[in-house]
Image: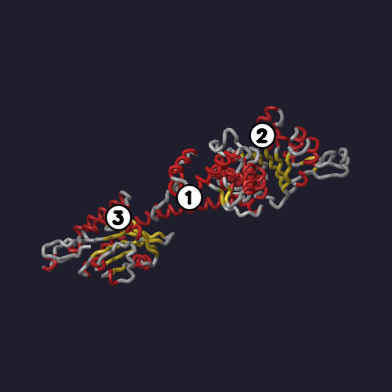
Amino acid sequence: METETHFPGVQDGTGLSCAEKQSGKAGECSTGTCRGRIVPLLRRMNELLSERDDFSGALDCLLAYMRNDMGIRRGMVSLYDRESGRIFVHRSIGLTPAEEDRGVYLMGEGITGKVVETARPIVVSRIGDEPTFLNRTESLSGKQDLDCSFMCVPIVRGSKVLGTISAERRYDDKWFVDKHLDVLVVMSYILAHALELYLIENVDKVQWENRTRQLISRIKEQFKPPNIIGNSAPMREVYALIRKVAPTRTTALLLGESGVGKEMIADALHYGGPTPEGPLVKFNCAAMPENLVESELFGHEKGAFTGATQSRKGKFEEADGGTIFLDEIGELALGAQAKLLRVLQDRQFERVGGNSSITVSIRIIAATNRDLAEMVAEGTFRQDLYYRLNVFPIMVPPLRERGNDIVTLAEHFVARYAVETEKRITSISTSALNMLTRHDWPGNVRELENVLHRAVILADDETIHSHDLPLSLQSPQLADSGMPNGLEARLRSIEYEMIVEALRQHRGNTTEAAQALGLTRRTMGLRMKRFNLNYKSFRQVVDKRAL
């Protein structure tokens, strides 16, 4: 910073020549604060704030006045974020963007922090003599900077400190300091109301929106059934439906392919329902011969048929006061469908061979992987029963539509079966994850679980590798067309995995990856070309944005 030198007849940045000072003509105009200069500033700032609602423009106008008319070398308007407790530079003159980014204080830190804490202006006559001046921006570098004065005034609205206006300049006359301090105080009064609105609209509103998003996320997580893994968009829709229907006794119909987890959703509906302490009885309609289904569901009386040596309760009676889950409802015989219809309507039925009606208080959840509407059209499923069951349908998405849930589920199954088999397996290799995410999973979650169970058993170290997975998951480019289950396919699979792992560990640096594998760079390039690998896919972009 250049040292101010006073010469007769030369302007010194205050609007008055040194000759005029020496001749005794120093007055308010010599500070740049006379009416002829400050009135246009006030009029312009009021126009920007009141008519145009341009808070940033008003700040720029003030800072320009501070630089051009008050001779301020460095000036800052800092804002106080009550939520985080941070005081940060919002607008400045004489500071670089990097210096602005460093100018962050907490309550009570440095001069700026003390001004916010006390809500009173502070003037430092010489920065070099003030130990509490932190120079957090690192903008002061020479002796001439330490000779400057520093003033900081709070921007107060009611009892709240919203920010500060600060200025740095060399002063030889305390009278000038007081006049400039008065200007900054007046400007703080003008800016207070507009700054409060600005913080509400641009800082507080953003924080409120962030808190709302976090709260909604926590609520969604809270209502996410603890027994179901996955947070993909299709599954979040399922969770929303579960959250709405679980507290009721409404009949629910779970639809979806085999292995998608319909039974686990039935668990969530029961334990999130009005009678979680009641029994949850599960019955697979396809697991029993047709002539035994009615007896299993509704029970039988002694002597009802050959072998019925005593009376026996059925699944509906066992589920009284709780929930019954009827899996594979589409496989139920037409005779049993008619009896089930009455249970849905009246919550009453008779045991096989009995005459007295039994009333139960139960919730019914049914599931199927078949198209019941099509079965109704074909006459293999009762239309009236279909409409009774289809009160609240929930379509469970197949695993191939659940995106990153595949990775989450894979890690869960690996952790579970590692404990079960007493193995220390901590990760899944990149190539193995790629194979898992590319697969269509016709058997859905059940198939994925079986694949990972097998992989844990086969694993020789702490990582699940691609060669631990079934060849049915191998990429076509890795399989040997002549012998898909032969030695060549296995060797290529291992080679592919090692190359991918090396590239991932070295972030796409081909030279380093080749050295790690003991290959030349040319050989590495040929093998990458063979497997259609591109080093750019393994590069990681680091976000270096300043806070």
For the C terminus, which image quadrant? Answer: bottom left
**Residue type marked 1:** Ala
Question: Splitting the image into 4 quarters, where does residue 15 fall?
Answer: bottom left
Q: Secondary structure at mark 2?
A: loop
Rate crowding at label 3 as few (under 14), some (14 to 19) or many (20 or more) other CA atoms within 10 Å: many
* Earlier-in-chain disc, 1 versus 2: 2
View extreme (top): residue: 378
For marks 1 and 2, give the CA distance.
52 Å
Front position in the image: 527 or 425: 527
427 on left or right of 328: left
What residue appears at the point 67 percent right and 33 percent down from the top-left corner? 372
* Earlier-in-chain disc, 3 versus 1: 3
Q: List the residue tagged with mark 3.
A: 59
Front position in the image: 184 or 133: 133
Which mark, residue 370? 2
The spot of residue 318 in percent (x, y) is 77, 47
The spot of residue 274 in percent (x, y) is 67, 50
